[in-house]
């Protein structure tokens, strides 16, 4: 019988096999030691999400309930949740969030300049494939690499395979880091294209929220799947 502990480190590193077993073996799972229930099938989760009278958020969204009754949107039920969300939505629009991009880029760039690489430092190229425009995780990876003394070649987001491969060759990069955060089936084609035009000798480390969707491509290309920033930090030290 499956045992599920959300605080287990192995689960944090790779939760997806556990999620599958929960769906298959225990779609409504009771964890007596931690006193919580977990539902794992999509239809059940959706129904519970919509039934706020039965499944209230007011008791908190943590297992311990430490956030219960705190004046935050996430621990409110309708009707209070609705008018509160309507106010916040006016602030967090796509245009307003997009306008923060120059600020974040400048901030990370200024932080990168605090860690200048030595002349003989290994180069590391960082990019997201075409169709993926989310680069926050990539910026964090670049900052980590700079802190560990790598010569960071930051290409940015949404780049076609030939441009990424050209940068790797031009800089004689020791490693290419890819970040995949968008759930788009066509990104698999982009990753395959990168694997075909990239120098065979170049190691590729790939991470991001959606990277595990492309496990078959990653394994076929002999790339390394990086599950979190802690793993990446360890790899950058080598």
Image (cartoon, rainbow, N blue to C red):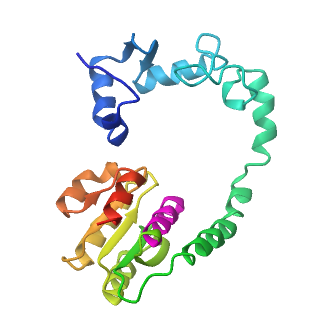
| Magenta residue check for 132 | yes
Specify whether residue 186 is in view: no
Compared to residue 71, the image places residue 92 above or below, namely below
**Residue nearer the viewer, 214 or 64:** 64
- Count of numbered badges drawn on the protein: 0
Residue 3 placement: quadrant:
top left
Overall secondary structure of the magenta stretch?
A: helix
Residue at the (39%, 12%) spot, across then down: 33
- Position of the C terminus, as image quadrant, is bottom left
Quarter occupied by the N terminus:
top left
Q: Is residue 162 visible?
A: yes
Q: What percent of the width, then of the height, locates residue 57? A: 63, 20
Q: Nearer the viewer, residue 201 or 189?
A: 201
Counting from the top left corner in percent of width and height, residue 15 is at 34, 36
Q: Which residue is found at the position 65% from the left and 73% from the top?
A: 106
Measured from the top left, where is residue 97 in percent x and y? 69, 57
The span picked out in magenta is 131-146
Q: Position of residue 167 (x, y in %)?
A: 38, 84
Left or right of residue 176: residue 75: right
């Amino acid at each position: 019988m499956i045992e599920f502990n959300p605080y287990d480190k192995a689960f944090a590193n790779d939760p997806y096999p556990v999620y599958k077993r929960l769906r298959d073996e225990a779609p409504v799972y009771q964890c007596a030691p931690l006193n919580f229930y977990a539902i794992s099938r999509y239809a059940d989760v959706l129904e519970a999400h919509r039934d706020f009278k039965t499944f209230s958020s007011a008791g908190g969204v943590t297992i311990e309930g430490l956030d219960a009754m705190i004046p935050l949107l996430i621990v409110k039920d309708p009707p209070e949740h609705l008018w509160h969300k309507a106010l916040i939505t006016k602030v967090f629009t796509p245009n307003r969030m997009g306008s923060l991009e120059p600020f974040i880029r400048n901030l990370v760039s200024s932080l990168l300049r605090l860690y200048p690489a030595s002349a003989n430092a290994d180069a590391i190229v960082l990019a997201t494939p075409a169709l993926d425009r989310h680069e926050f995780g990539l910026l964090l990876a670049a900052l980590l690499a700079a802190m560990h003394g790598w010569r960071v070649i930051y290409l940015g987001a949404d780049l076609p395979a030939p441009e990424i491969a050209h940068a790797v060759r031009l800089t004689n990069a020791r490693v290419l880091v890819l970040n995949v955060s968008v759930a788009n089936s066509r990104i698999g084609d982009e990753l395959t294209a990168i694997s075909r035009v990239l120098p065979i000798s170049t190691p590729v480390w790939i991470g991001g929220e959606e990277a595990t969707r492309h496990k078959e491509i990653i394994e076929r290309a002999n790339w390394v799947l990086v599950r979190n920033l802690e793993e990446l930090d360890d790899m950058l030290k080598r």
